[in-house]
Image: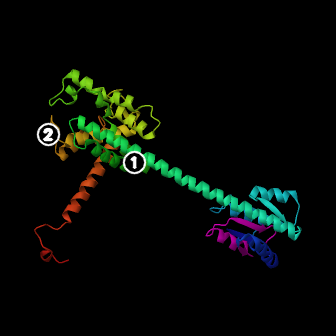
Amino acid sequence: MLAMIVDDSRSSLLHLQQLVERDSGVRAMAFLDPEMALDAALTHRFDMAIVDHIMPKVDGITFIRRMRGTNGHGQIPIVMLTATSDDAVRLAALEAGATDFLSKSQSPVELKVRLRNLVKLSNALRQLDDHVTQQALEIEKATQALLSREEEMVFRLSKALEYRDNDTNDHTFRVAKYSRMISERLGLTQQECRSIYLASPLHDIGKVAIPDGILLKPGLLDDDERAIIKTHAEIGARILRGSASDLIRLAAQIAECHHERWDGAGYPRGLAGEAIPLCARIVAIADVFDALTTERPYKKAVPVASALAILEAERGRHFDPACLDAFLSAYAEMESAAAAAESSELSPYVTVGDAPES
């Protein structure tokens, strides 16, 4: 344990230091200058403090107030040493954060006992603080373990859905990646970006209820079949809605609204503009882009340039213009970085000795 003692009287300071250290095993740092003591509080963690009332530069009440404001000293015992019994002074000290008072007129025996009790209180508070800190660490560890299992469950469910939905070759994971790109470019918080990344793979979970004859049909759907497959949005919302998990509730919003359109012509609720949850507006772009650029049993993949042109043509109709701008900007940056990385590699047909001089 480490104690702070502050008194502008050298003799009083040494006497208090000896009393604190002699019987308790506490190490005490003594200060004649209260400003130096406050500076030390910025770099040391003290377990208790004893401060004189009347001092030059900084009086005891002001010192206590400033000491309480330093990191780690909000709850430690701080005792003010005073020769006055003025209630107003004592009240001001208590309001500033004093724990107790020591009277300069007390007998040496009483002073010794009161200091010993102060050390016991400080030790108990330190042990309590350490226990609370350890408990907080254990709770954080358990919380992270629960979140990790929750995240694993989401990705395994989405992977299982892909195997049923024509084995769409990691479609959900690419949608998650594109959704995170858009979220980051929109300036969402790190936690919001992560949540959308984790929730987006469940956007088509409602397809588990669609009959195989429709879901796995290799050709184009007729009107009745399209009406049935459109129900997957509402079904997905019903599967996920009402969860105690923030992540699953976010996934429910995405599942229900990722087929809504900016102009209100989407489904299932015909929402328009900002009435569509932002997470769903983001995933809508990621979902369509990946569907366009990947091959499916019923269609060929569209070249990236053509897919980007299709997205641009739907600005303000299907897609939120701000989300589309974020995707186009982020995708162009990703492509540029990939091209730069590729061009920086030596050709496998050029030896090191053939490389041009710098």
Q: Quadrant of the C terminus?
A: bottom left
* Element under disc 1: helix
Residue 129 seen by the camera: yes
**How far apart are labels 2 and 1 at the CA level?**
32 Å
Q: Position of residue 236 (x, y in %)?
A: 35, 31
Q: Residue at point 12% right, 73% down?
A: 351
Q: Nearer the viewer, residue 48 or 316?
A: 48
Mark 2 is surrounded, within 10 Å at the Cα level, by few (under 14), some (14 to 19) or many (20 or more) other residues, namely few
Whichever of labels 2 and 1 marks the residue nearer the N terminus, that label is 1
Q: Quadrant of the N terminus?
A: bottom right
The type of residue carrying mark 1 is Arg
Residue 61 seen by the camera: no
Q: Which mark is on residue 65?
A: none
Q: Which region is colored magenta? A: 28-55
Q: Are marks 2 and 1 in contact (CB under 8 Å)?
A: no
Please tell me in which quadrant of the rendered image residue 19 appears: bottom right
* Element under disc 2: loop
Q: Nearer the viewer, residue 109 or 209?
A: 109
Please tell me in which quadrant of the rendered image residue 71 appears: bottom right
Color scheme of the displayed model: rainbow
Q: Residue at point 29% right, 27% down?
A: 209
Q: Position of residue 310 (x, y in %)?
A: 22, 40
- The residue that mark 2 highlights is 300
Give yes or no for residue 66 being in the magenta stretch. no
- The residue that mark 1 highlights is 194
Count of numbered tags = 2
Q: Is residue 91 above or below residue 255?
A: below
Q: Is residue 200 above or below residue 21?
A: above
Is residue 50 rendered to the left or right of residue 266? right
Is residue 45 rendered to the left or right of residue 84? left
Q: Position of residue 83 (x, y in %)?
A: 87, 67
Please tell me in which quadrant of the rendered image residue 308 appears: top left
